[in-house]
Image (spheres, helix red, strand yellow):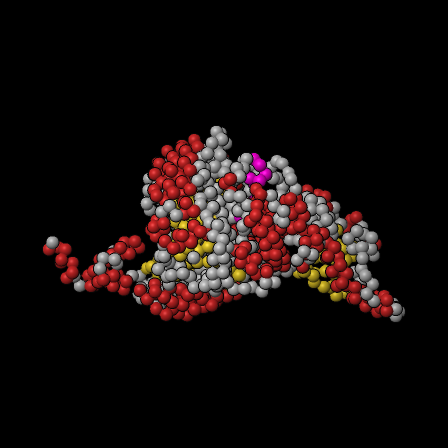
Amino acid sequence: MKVQSAMFYFPEEVIEHIFSFLTHHPDRNTVSTVCKAWYKIERLSRREVFVGNCYAIRPDRAAARFPGLRSLTLKGKPHFADFDLVPPDWGGLAGPWIEAMARSCPNLEELRMKRMVVSDESLELLAHAFPNFKALVLVSCEGFSTDGLAAVARSCKSLRELDLQENEIEDRGPRWLNSFPDMCTSLVSLNFACLKGEVNLKSLERLVCRSPNLKCLRLNRAVPVETLAKIMNQCPNLEDLGTGSLLADQFSEAYVSLISALQKCKKLRCLSGFWDASPLCLLAVYPICANLTGLNLSYAPTVQGQDFINLIQHCVKLLRLWVLDSVGDKGLAVVASACKELQELRVFPSDLFAAGPATVTEEGLVAISTGCPKLNSLLYFCHSMTNSALITVSKNCPNFTRFRLCILEPRKPDPATNEPLDEGFGAVVKTCKNLRRFSISGLLTDQVFYYIGKYAKALEMLSIAFAGDTDQGMTYVLNGCKNLRKLEIRDCPFGDGALLADVTKYETMRSLWMSSCDISLRGCKALATKMPSLNVEIINEWEAEMEENLNNGVAEVISNNNNKHINNGNDERKVEKLYVYRTVGGPRTDAPDFVWTL
Amino acid sequence: MEEMQPKLLDLIPNERGWGVTANDREMVIGGGFGVREEKKLELRLGLPGEEDWNANRKKTEGLCANVKPSFSLGLFGAPQTKQEAGLITGEAQKIHAKADKQTSVVERKAIAHAATPPAATPLPSNSRAANAPVVGWPPVRSFRRNLASTSKTVLEPQKWASGTCAKFENSTKGLFVKINMDGVPIGRKIDLKAYDSYDKLSSAVDQLFRGLLADQRSEIGTEKNVEEKGRAIQGLLDGSGEYTLVYEDDEGDKMLVGDVPWEMFVSTAKRLRVLKSSDLSASTLRTTSRKRAATEC
């Protein structure tokens, strides 16, 4: 008893110091709920905030609560936006967040955003509002151009990191690279691999020359071998390199220069890019392969067959490998024999519609599991899979935390037995106790969901497509997966019964996505009525479009306050796309006319 | 918009004539659009085979007016997003977006009445419908989709020319090459990206030089009638005219214009010349057959 009351006599500074050892967000969230004093200390000392859904809280409120914020991470659109299931102009605007931070958190140093819409104006504001700004990381974002990048480059005096991953960036010319001022020498990480246009090569070379701390550099396809060689000669301490185009004549001076430059890079651990890689250019890479821990060949369809095998057999320390399925089962077998430390493997499809001959099959996956028992993260696209292969894989690799299997043809059964793949995926959840992320495909009945609900206790994110028979399937998952945070479902026969089976569950989750399922407006309305702390949003594009066309192209703005469509009496209409998420921010104020909040 | 579709159908007379694989993304512009739609509505058995699924996926969303119920799988697609712009040039993109918007209403009305819950129609695994393109499937980001559709057209790496600025082909930039004409001292420059066929190029050349040529003639000879000015330059491509169009390729060889597929021509032509047909001889031109064998994919 004495010890417990002693806590109240600790000065705030001591408690704050204790809190500084809590780096895990959920832990900090928990301590803030203990008492008012702790809430206050925690919020004033908080330096990093992670907002998994940018609509879960109003930007102003987040900024006001954490005035000492240094690092903010935001995620916008639902995951299925990556696959064009979310219409453009849906939302996820970064502007309000950057404005709120500019008003309340001037010490912001880092901003990480994923699937958000960022404008050049917002980037301009960012560049001027935060004098200590150090790191900007944009993943799968859109809405900005190279002019916005120029603003950031120009005005962020101590910029350390500019990391652009798979964004849609409007190219307004190569001048943006010139915007880094001459006195800018602080760059540690620069990634512009996703830029489609030309780059001013001289500017790039000069920038690299005056950045002695550069550890990570990922170039885009417009940078030729000649420039790459010059750059490599300038930074022998580089740890992470994304090459530009590797198209070169083997006898050219550029190629020879590249070979010698690469050999000097003793610290190089991670390689990507490899656009247009000619087999001969790959030879330049062999000397450094032995030390590589990360290799991304997924943008290099030219690296296959024997070229791939020759390369990969040297990569004995590899932890992370991303490839295209054109490497084939044969290539994967070599990976299995050479890369004993492998932890993460991603195999992407080179032929999206399974129209050609099968490239990788279950054999490749089984070989990998046999050779690489440390494997814990998998993304595998293939033409077909068998139950026995999956059972073998899970026996070999019980440590999966992320397991995503995509069979290209929807609802495809086990070709050996013609049965569903319930048992195979069931084996994965039974064996892999630490499974946090799971994506399933192929022919699946309610049975696989029974297994998931029963065994996948650590599961946080589940992606389902073209699976299940009845509402019971979804219900198993909602009832069983205690740690579920994100559930995304498309083209499954789950209806209102499943949706309403456990409505309080959604308050424990970040979000639910259901598209092309069997839910009706009535069911969604019922959910909204029962759970006011959730935003229940419906995306109905064709109705909005019909309205527009009826008015001869004069777009009639259907605001959320206008219940004309929602309440015109036909609640049995099927809902095309449903997005449900918990929030303290109330209904969205920026929803477009095709998004209805119930 | 209805009148747009017949026009698009006419653009490429014989889709298969050039022997280019259907995955060539440039084929999507113009003619591939309408012609592939016809094939889409055909009843066929067997594996899908040669079609450009990536392009078709986007087109079927917009254009299938009479859609079989099994096509209702996930066809409540979004209109084209900006992410797909990477695959198509600016003009074509606008056409597609407009067409999608206009006709998608018709399509969705039809589907709304015909739709059955997706799982209720069990699909045999080897049926064509099972392989029909579905929106957002397979779950691959747009960056990778673009790569997957163009990976089949990767040819032998060409000789790489040195220079301080990377010669990176950006589909929105122009490709200007010099063009000279016999008898005209001043050359012109022409943007090959502005055209999508040899016929268009030929008439553009005619427009460019017609006036200049007439001026030259009237200077040299005695005054001609006004009719002489602006006499059309015809038969550039088939040897039937007074002049013939030739080009110099990236290996420095002089070639007759019109032999290879248009896209291959655009990527290898370095300059153009309009020669007097009478000046052409077998020795000044390399035969194309050997070259074609080497570069065909």
Q: Main secondary structure of the magenta part?
A: loop
Magenta residue span = B126-135
Q: Is residue A319 left or right of residue A38?
A: right
Give the quarter of the figure containing the N terminus of chain A. Answer: bottom left
Residue A154: quarter of image: bottom left
At x 83%, y 53%, the residue is B240
Q: Position of residue A180 (x, y in %)?
A: 46, 66
For this view, does B61 lie left or right of residue A110? right
Q: Position of residue A195 (x, y in %)?
A: 51, 57
Residue appearing at x 72%, y 57% in the figure = B201
Q: Nearer the viewer, residue A428 or B19?
A: A428
> Is A237 rendered above or below residue A429?
below
Farthest residue to the front: give it: A569
Q: Nearer the viewer, residue A257 or A69?
A: A69
The percent position of residue A374, horizontal first and vertical second, equals 36, 39
Q: In the rendered view, would you say B48 is above or below B83?
A: above
Check the image and name the residue furthest to the left: A2
